[in-house]
Amino acid sequence: MAEPQPPQVREGADVDDETPAVPASAEDRKAAAALSSLDARPEDDEGTSEKTQLDQEALGKAMSRLELVSKGKEGDRGKSKEGEVEKKKPVVKVDQADVVLLIEQLELSKPKATELLRAHEGNAVKAMRAFITASV
């Protein structure tokens, strides 16, 4: 014998015959609307094509702005505000003991401490003085 069925289930009823239950909360209603929009096929009416065209135009404008910005950055490399060519920063070897000293004493992160030391030619005393002077 079969198990007893809940009272909502009717024998021989298809899933399509059932009326969908209305979601109780607003969140459930939003989720149901989102799921139903996934199943819906786009219609070929005039409003949809205009919206798609506007989206394409906006995308094109955004892409052109990105290209301009990236070209501008490539052109600005190696130039200062006055248009002069900057000298390459010299490679400065930084002692790890100095990095640890700055991390402990000034409570900096390791990359920040390393950057500060490189900016002051690896001299821990100059780097600490500059950091303290800048923060006062």
Image (cartoon, grey):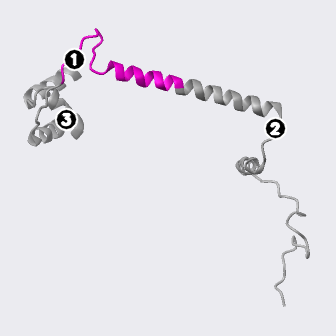
- Give the camera-side residue of 24 and 29: 29
Q: Is residue 12 above or below residue 66?
A: below
Point out residue 39 in the picture as x, y percentages from the top left corner: 76, 51
Whether residue 18 appears in this view of the structure is yes
| Residue that appears at 37% across and 22% down | 73
**Amino acid on which the number 1 mark rests in the picture:** Glu
**Amino acid on which the number 2 mark rests in the picture:** Asp
Numbered circle sitting on residue 70 = none
SS for callout 1: loop
For label 3, the residue is 113
- Asked if labels 3 and 1 touch by Cβ distance under 8 angstroms, the answer is no
Does residue 90 show up magenta in the picture?
Answer: no
Query: Mark 1 vs mark 3: which is more N-terminal?
Result: 1
Dividing the picture into quadrants, the one containing residue 122 is: top left
Outermost residue, bottom side: 1
Can you say which quadrant of the picture contains the C terminus? top left
Marks 3/2: CA distance? 60 Å
Q: Check disc 1: other Cα within 10 Å, few if <14, some if 14-19, many if 20+.
A: few
For label 1, the residue is 86
- Asked if labels 2 and 3 touch by Cβ distance under 8 angstroms, the answer is no
| Residue that appears at 80% across and 31% down | 47
Query: Mark 3 vs mark 2: which is more N-terminal?
Result: 2
For label 2, the residue is 44
SS for callout 3: helix
Which span is picked out in magenta? Answer: 64-88
| Residue that appears at 11% across and 42% down | 96
Whether residue 136 appears in this view of the structure is no
Point out residue 103 in the picture as x, y percentages from the top left corner: 18, 39
**Amino acid on which the number 3 mark rests in the picture:** Ala
Does residue 72 show up magenta in the picture?
Answer: yes
Point out residue 1 in the picture as x, y percentages from the top left corner: 84, 91
Horizontal relation, residue 38 to residue 94: left or right = right
